[in-house]
Image: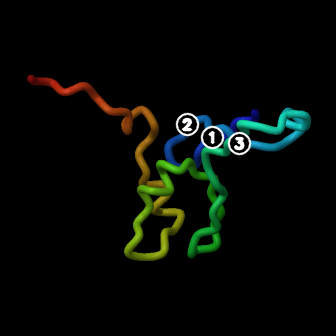
Amino acid sequence: MAREPCDGCGRAVQIAGGIANLWSFGGDRTEGLTLELADGSEHFLCYGCIERLPDDRDPTAEDVAALAPHEEREERPDSGE
């Protein structure tokens, strides 16, 4: 499987296809998509970042730039219980 960085969070995302998968027929999963946004820009985004784009209007490159890097998005353990 090949990997490509997400334009939103920077995480290396698995992409299916290519010569590496020529003879494998099962289990190939892509973890993101390339989207053309309202302003004409194209961005490869993981599904998590796609979910975080605004849905009350057409997203733009500014919305992609505003997505938090992967390290900032990771769940942190609860501090008290």
Give the structural element (helix, strand or loop) at label 3: strand
The spot of residue 79 in percent (x, y) is: 15, 24
- In primary-sequence order, the first of circles 1 and 2 is 1
Disc 2 residue type (three-letter): Arg
Give the structural element (helix, strand or loop) at label 2: loop
Disc 3 residue type (three-letter): Ile
Confirm or deny contact between disc 3 and disc 2 (CB under 8 A). no
Q: Residue at x 75, y 35 (%)?
A: 2
Picture layout, residue 7 above or below residue 25: below
Q: Residue at x 61, y 49 (%)?
A: 32
Confirm or deny contact between disc 1 and disc 2 (CB under 8 A). yes
The residue that disc 3 covers is: 15
The residue that disc 2 covers is: 11
The residue that disc 1 covers is: 5
Disc 1 residue type (three-letter): Pro
Crowd rating for badge 1 (residues with CA inside 10 Å; few <14, some 14–19, many 20+):
some
Front-lying residue, 21 or 50: 21
